Amino acid sequence: MAFVAVAGPVEPAWYGTLFPAVGTAYVGSGLLAWYRRPANRVGPLLVAAGVVMYLAGFELTGTPVLIAIGLVFSLAPIAVILHLLLAFPTGRLTTRAARALAVAGYVVVVGTDVVRYSLTPGVPFAVGDAPAVVAAIGLTQRIGTIVIILATSALLVHRFRLAMPTQRRTLAPLYAFGILTIGYIVFAANVLPPLLGLDLSTVAATQVIAIGLIPFAFAVGVLRGGFARTAALEDLGLWLARGDRDPEAVRGAVAETLGDPDARLVFRIDDGYVDAGGNTAEPAPGRATARVRLHGAEIGAIVHDPALVPDSAHVDAVCGTIAIALDRQRLVAELRASRARVTEAADAERRAIARDLHDGIQGRLVLLRLQAAGSVDAGPGDVLAGLDRAIDELRQLVHGVMPAMLVENGLGAAVEDLADRLPVRTAVDVRVHNDLPPVVQSTAYFVVAEALTNAIKHAGASQLDVRVRRDDADVHIEVCDDGCGGARVGGQGGLRGVRDRVEALGGRFEVADLPGGGTRLCGRLPCAS
Amino acid sequence: MRVVIGEDEPLLREGLALLLSRNDFDVVSAVGDADALRAAAATHRPDVVVTDIRMPPGNTDDGLRAALDIHGADPPTPVLVLSQHVSRRYVTTLLGDRAGGIGYLLKHRVTDVESFCDDLSRVARGAVVLDPEVVAVMVGRSARDDGRVDRLTPRQLQVLGLVAEGRSNLAIAHRLGITEKAVGRHAAQIYDTLGLPLSLDDHRRVLAVVRFLDR
């Protein structure tokens, strides 16, 4: 059996240029892959392989020392290609089996050559003459190489079977091409000349060309990125660190890193998720949700296809990498969403006021006008009674928009007045002065009013407690009830509106069940003046 | 009967002045802010002052504070304060430890001219007059929080409210269409239930009932 038949007696002139050309192909494609995927080690490996090809080509020079080097490295490309196959796609030998096979490859293919060469008489640096040993080593090399190739093939087939469909699309041609090339290199010299009548030089040339095609396959594989896995993770981190990325770009980068083109990023808001536009994002069936955490708190999630991204450790690593970028986007999304809701709430309020004015007082006044003019029948006192009702309605409407007590006497008086009119016993303990900014007072009033309404309407409470305190920086609002609990800040509705208003002022609003039953609503409003 | 009016809305101020003038009140001054009201009261020494609560210069409860000053001056002048909205806190503030000559009504009660003029005269004579709405709030709150009030019959609650509004037994009897004696019996049962002293004159029983409701 002859490997690459470089030592043929007659060599065409072009043959000498093959090794440098193939070496350049390796170095070139390796540099490209290295540049585009700095964290992926396939690039450096290809460059190293290119250097090995140059060294193998030294065999064709006339200088004895270089020939010696060339002979030692003549089979090294096989070991390097095996290494590349085993390390693909990350460029790292991640399993013990892969490491063992790669090392065995170098020892059996290159190491045995060194020993054999040093025992061959007449070559530079020969240390002895032992034909029997040389023959034995040659046999060991051949058998060992075949065993390693078969073992590598088995390992790659095993990996291929574990891989997901998108990964297989990339792995299949590369693995097949790699194994076939090695097989061709190893067996072509023995099989092709008798079978096709080719001379050895031509076969050797096709072997070198086949080796020369391999780096392109690897480079394309690395650059396609769909299978780039953990290697691309570091690229993602570098890319994120280089600047502020817009949500769609981050999503695209995550999709590429995970190899799932439909991967989505969602942001955690209260009990649910929203997308970058602030819209509620419902988890779709068949999609997996990987939580992104920052400082222990969930800030968002990557929604992906579990079949395409089977390695949860990899997804978690991606989650860790994008956490800070995602958190920033989450804040923006949250702000947008709450702005939109505050605007919508204000709009809804205006609509409600307009409707009340139109349906109530305006209609009543029109009727009164007709009654006063005698256009419709009206009993004595009807007009006066109608006017009284109109006055009363208008008064209540004005009170609903901005309570008189809040304007005239501040938060404490307004809350007390509110509590006086509730059907449920309500203890009020408000200890703030009226020098609070008006917007803080009206927001605090709104918090209390909504909390009390909520407790009475939904919690079936029989005792309510309102406490408002102020420290140097904040106003603290606490409303407790003894009802059934279970209150939540939903996606919309009263408590959501409360939180939006509070957060619009830079405050916090939280709802929690009390241990013994009941609900506790807490608001904190900054009031530093 | 000499009256000083404090009301910042010119149309309402003139309307009120006209209305009172036509009903045998002598409107000696009608002003539009709290400071002018204090000055007018000091200058004219009227029998009664009618004022809005929300007034310049602060546009919060300036009228109320002016009214308290005027009522607390020497000699005290009875005050009737008007407001868009009535609250228990203002009742507490207005009554304080005062013995009478205090009125607190929703602004639009002026449209019932006869009743309003009667209320104003009673305040001028030293009575306590409270708006039915604020009394209803106070009675409702007491019934909610205090078992004794909750035990009262609906009729007794009605009588209790009218007493708190500052009405005499005769006026209550007219209002409810029952005899004055029946009102007296209801009142006695109410005082008994609430643990209030029985032998009080009209003025003092109002204060006692309102203070009970304000607890």
Image (cartoon, rainbow, N blue to C red):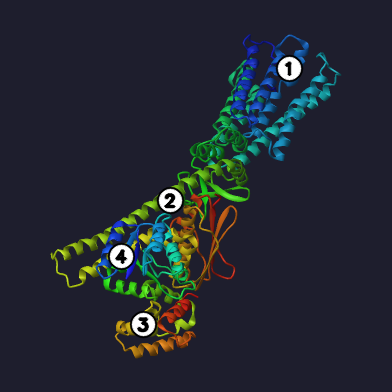
Label 3 and label 4: CA atoms lie apart by 27 Å
Q: Residue A354: x, y in percent? A: 31, 56
**On what subunit does the disc labeled 1 rest?**
A
Mark 3 or mark 4: whose residue is earlier in sequence? 4
Residue type, label 4 = Val
Label 1 and label 3: CA atoms lie apart by 126 Å
Instruction: Using a 10 Å C-alpha cutoff, classify the residue at mark 4 as few (fewer than 14 neighbours), some (14 to 19) or many (20 or more).
Output: many
Residue type, label 1 = Gly
The residue most toward the left is: A375
- Which residue in the structure is indicated by mark 1? A70
* Up-down relation of residue A157 to residue A184 (above or below): below
- Which residue in the structure is indicated by mark 4? B27
Q: Is label 4 on the same chain as label 2?
A: no
Residue type, label 2 = Val
SS label for mark 1: helix
- Which residue in the structure is indicated by mark 3? B168
- Which residue in the structure is indicated by mark 2? A342
Q: Residue A155: x, y in percent? A: 65, 39
* Up-down relation of residue A7 to residue A143 (above or below): above
Q: Nearer the viewer, residue B212 or A69?
A: B212
